[in-house]
Amino acid sequence: MTTKHLAGRVALVTGASQGIGRACAIALAEAGASVALAARNADKLAEVAAEIASAGGVAHPFALDIAEEESIKACAKAVVAHFGKLEILVNNAGITRDILTLRMKRKDWDDVLQTNLTGAFLMTQAAMSPMLKAKWGRVINITSVVGETGQAGQANYAASKAGLIGLTKAHARELATRSITVNAVAPGYIETAMTGVLTDEQKATMTTQVPLQRVGTVEEVAHAVTFLASEGAAYITGHTLDVNGGMYMG
């Protein structure tokens, strides 16, 4: 049974229209938080908001292009204007442009770093003011197992996710004195639309690399996020929580 341990809190989830972001938004709402849903796809956000409302939760969609600084600033301001505060930030929005480095275009590199790393930096920066004012906050960055292990054909993505782990530690040190924790969650092989394009053979090969011998679910990642957002995780900061079935044991 889900307890309302986040009742009264306001959370913002980027990339909330699908996959891990959607699951995080639903889990936070189930835990009692009012959830700001941010992404580019307004129709999908409306569907998530309706799903949360039908279950008795509170959610509202906000337009966000995480690759655009002005959009990030406008989104953060709109959330505070609507809910009156912003206490929990889940930096989940991200993209991939997979190709071997020899063939990788500069734009493939720039787009992934701009979205996955710079976007998270700017969104955290925009969310800091209301958290500093309240002297309470939770920032949770969704990184990846490939940011810890590396992955051929994903130099841009792995670099962005490794950078996110470093950003997590730096922000954790900067914000600790204000009772704001900053942590990361590093999913492994999770069943999402991103992995759905893989062939059965590719999926089987990847599963053999997982000691638990199965793929993870978006709900399992969301459980880790809601824990780090809770009072129960108040003494955890600068940490990367691996949700990967044992693929990487750091």
Image: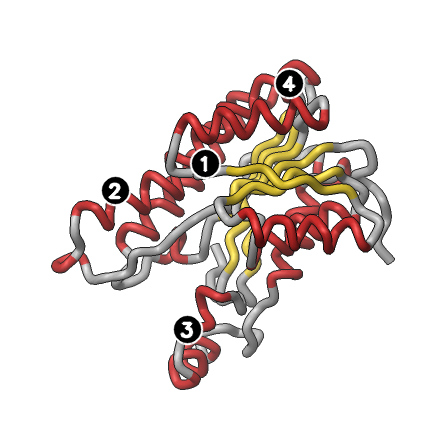
Q: Can the viewer see residue 240? A: no
Which secondary structure, mark 3? Answer: loop
Residue at the spot x=39%, y=85% of the render? Answer: 201
| Crowd class of label 3 (few under 14; some 14 to 19; many from 20; radius 10 Å) | few
| Residue labelled with disc 3 | 197
Residue 6 percent coordinates (x, y): 79, 39
Q: Earlier in the sequence, mark 4 or mark 1?
A: 1
- Which percent across, then down, holds residue 96? 35, 55
Q: Quadrant of the N terminus?
A: bottom right
Disc with the residue nearer the chain's start (2 vs 1) = 2
Q: Quadrant of residue 121?
A: top left
Of badges 3 and 1, nearer the viewer stands 3
Q: CA distance from mark 3 to mark 1?
A: 26 Å
Q: What's the distance in space between the residues labelled 3 and 4, CA to CA?
A: 43 Å
Q: Are marks 4 and 2 in contact (CB under 8 Å)?
A: no
Give the CA distance from mark 4 to mark 1.
20 Å
Q: Is residue 215 visible?
A: yes
159 relative to 39 in the view: left or right = left
Q: Earlier in the sequence, mark 3 or mark 2?
A: 2
Res 120 label: 1
Which residue is at 45% across, 36% downward? 120
